[in-house]
Amino acid sequence: MQLPESLQPWREWLQWFAPEQLPLFADLFGRLNPVLGPLRGLQQGGVPEPDGLSDLHRRGPYDRLLSSEWLLAEEVPDEFLRRAVVGEHLFLAPQYRAQQASRLIVALFDAGPLQLGAARLVHMALLILLARRAKDAGGELRWGIFQQTPELHAFESAAQLKRLLSARTFTSVAPEHWQAWRHYLSAQPEPVGECWLVGQRLPATERQSCSHRVQVLRSLDGRSLSFALQAAGSRRVTLPIPDERLALQLLKGNFEGEVAATAPAAKGCVPRVSLTLQPVVSSAGTHVALKLLDEPGVVVIKLPEQNQKKALEIRRNLWSAGLTPLTATFFGRALGAVLSDQHTLSFWSMPGLKPVDKPSPAELKLPPGTASFLPAIGLRNHSTGRLFLLDSQGHLAFWVVETGRTPAKPKTRYTHRLADGVLCIAKVHGDAVAYVRREGDRLHTHSVNADGHVTAAYVVGVADDVSQVLFAASYLWRASFGGCALLTLDNDGAQRWRIVSAKGSPFEDEHVDLAPGWKGIGLLQEDNERYSLLLLSPSQHAIAVYCEGGQNVLFTTADPIVKFSFCPLSGVIAALTSARELLVYSVPQRLMRLQVFCKNQPHKKEGTDDWT
């Protein structure tokens, strides 16, 4: 999510919200943050404690006089007196260690009838401000509700904000509520550095047990709120009543930018997978495959249906040891792979494709290892089929399926060259692969089907400085051009995308300038014919979508995303994090389909390749 500079300090928490909700927080933060004052929990306090010896000084009490000086008093008393007069005696100086106050911040909120409505939004904003206050100090924030049984909660996700909002009660804060909390806090192993009481008509408290008192009151005319803080001094600020529509969204817990945590419970054991190879998504968006880490093969996961109760359908498929996988793709309904040895290319689990002699590097540049899967797409129809592969030098090659009916043209068991200077390929229809190639100073797009028919060139722009192309899936690719996005970079490295609409589209070409660090990773044409650009955040912790001038976070991850794949046909994106957590999200449905860790040591059932 792109945030203005004024909101950058709180980006970790604001990513939970939709962009249209951010102005409300920008106003509240701008008014409240200057009022909070410095963190008192970091101040040095208490009586210093001795911590060994520091140095030798010429002044000090005589009970710390160096022992050699006392020997001098016995042997040469006049010299001892002379040194005492001119200040030449040496004294031991102790080292002191100052006590440091606790960095734990505790916030207790009044959830009673006097704090319903807009006051609860102030609670939310204050909780985020205190979270950043604690993080900057290297401390912790814990919060609780006055009227509930004393229990402190962490603040790590938007679910905690919903918990705060749902804690409504018709009971006002009473002295016994504070007494229960005071006993609870005093019994905690870690002392409280700052204790914030937030509400209205707060009970009387002792100075040593409560450092901050916040009164949130609505004005008599109902047009503003008063935020009064009592700490070392008294400070007050007036807050406007927020927009009613946005306020209702937030008070109902509708955080559109929140992590989509509605994925089905993943009941199943997925073996460890490689972090160097991207996931493979089927064209229908029903299966995801990942390369196994400990064995030569892949694990294929069938995505669960919504509200599915049974365990995940997980299948482990292995190929012969010693072969190098160059790529993996769904060929028909099954997952296949192109495997290499020193002299031969073989097509594992791809019926109709027979091994071929390994092409020379000039014909097809194939990597010696498995740093990343090469782009590959398989097409099949009732009579024939082709497997297309793009190497690292822009050579687009293909192999023809052997049907056994009539001799295929071109011939099978042979590597064919389709085009050179190719930047990208993608499956954009059930029977069409789109690719873009450089010809002179122009970029030309084509599509090719399973029979090998190539459409006429469609010029999409000047080739200069274009480093990447993203394709949108569309039926228009069968005959001509179906839409794409072209990437160029600014002088500061920020990405600039030009979305080229399909011929006949009512929308003109669109230019999208991304904030530094954001990356475009996919292009999707949704039902309204508008194009949506999928984005990866600079921290690699979030996937967002840019559409119609606005940007929304689809989901976030606890660990950075190291590999991902997006299928423009199904609109499904699969993201693999550094913790081997797989997240599969459907962009058209705005729904998390799967969230599972792929790092278990499963037990294989006898006589089967299924792992559960």
Image (tube, helix red, strand yellow):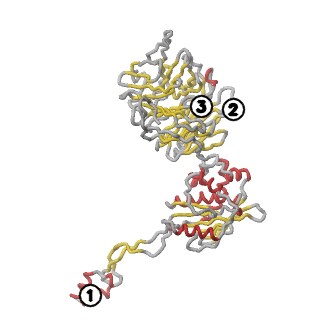
Q: Which residue corresponds to the image point at 49% horizontal and 46% vertical from the top-left?
A: 559
* Residue 6 drawn at (x, y percent): 61, 54
Type of the residue with mark 3: Ser
Q: Which residue corresponds to the image point at 69% horizontal and 29% vertical from the top-left?
A: 505
Q: Secondary structure at mark 1?
A: helix
Q: Which residue corresponds to the image point at 62% horizontal and 64% vertical from the top-left?
A: 146
Of 436 and 211, nearer the camera is 211
Give residue 276's quadrant in the image: top left
Q: Indicate which label's residue lies in the foreground, 2 or 3.
A: 3
Q: What residue did someone put label 3 on?
A: 570
Disc on the earlier residue, 2 or 3? 2
Q: Which residue corresponds to the image point at 64% horizontal and 62% vertical from the top-left?
A: 32
Of 469 and 101, nearer the camera is 101
* Residue 250 drawn at (x, y percent): 67, 52
Above-or-below relation of 273 to 30 = above
Type of the residue with mark 2: Phe
Disc on the earlier residue, 3 or 1? 1
Above-or-below relation of 211 to 380 = below
Verify CB contact (< 8 Å) between mark 3 and mark 1: no
Q: What residue did someone put label 2 on?
A: 507
Q: Indicate which label's residue lies in the foreground, 3 or 1.
A: 3
* Residue closest to the far front: 606
Q: What residue did someone put label 1 on?
A: 80
The Cα atoms of the two marked residues, 2 and 1, are separated by 99 Å
Type of the residue with mark 1: Phe
